[in-house]
Image: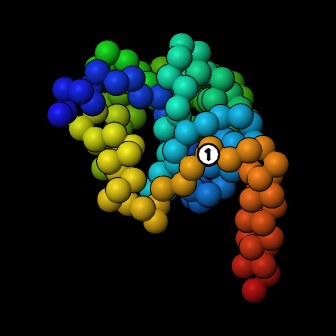
Amino acid sequence: MTEAHLERDTVALFTPIPNGKVLAAVCAVNGIRGTVLETSAGAFAVLDDTSDGSTDTAGEVISAFVKQQPILAMERRAGQITVHRWLAGVKGASLPPGLALDQAPGVIVTLMSGTQTIDELALTHPDKVFTAQMGRLKAFRELRSLAKVAKKQAGA
């Protein structure tokens, strides 16, 4: 079964956004479809579109949203992992995969190494997985709702 996982391309973004719902909504508002996994180190979006260039498009959009902190755009193609740093909408240097994944949560290493798929991880972490499959209007409403909750929590 692991060999089949390795044959599948995986395109993902690792962000400092602590809330998986927020990242899922930001992705959906920008037309980026995928599945978001919330981890202790930030939210991780696995993109549905694995075509060439999809990582750069998503990296540019999401890093422009995050602005002040870098994100990592990761690809696994034909078993080879590549990682690029993005900051404020600008693609940065390529990072050695071992270095980039060294401090990453285990679920990210598992996914990027091809040991498990995002669907398999969703089964074992159902409360930490969110979809970026909603329409733009619904995603915008979700972001507005999440912002209201955050504002209330900050004021309490």
Q: Residue at x 24, y 38 (%)?
A: 115
Q: Residue at x 61, y 36 (%)?
A: 33
Furthest residue to the bottom? 156
8 is higher (above) or lower (below) than 133: above
Residue 96 place in picture, x, y as percent? 37, 24
Q: Amino acid at mark 1?
A: Ala
Quadrant the C terminus occupies = bottom right
Judging from the image, the colouring scheme is: rainbow
Of helix, strand and loop, which one carries label 1? loop
* Total tally of numbered discs in the picture: 1
- Does the rendering let one see residue 16? no
In the displayed structure image, the side of residue 34 where residue 1 appears, left or right? left
Q: Residue at x 19, y 26 (%)?
A: 3
- Does the rendering let one see residue 75? yes
63 is higher (above) or lower (below) than 16: above
Bin the neighbour count of mark 1 within 10 Å (Cα to Cα): few under 14, some 14-19, many 20 and up. Answer: many
Quadrant the N terminus occupies = top left
Q: Residue at x 62, y 29 (%)?
A: 59
Residue 97 place in picture, x, y as percent? 35, 28
Residue 130 place in picture, x, y as percent? 54, 54
133 is higher (above) or lower (below) than 8: below
Residue 65 place in picture, x, y as percent? 74, 41
Q: Which residue is mark 1?
A: 132
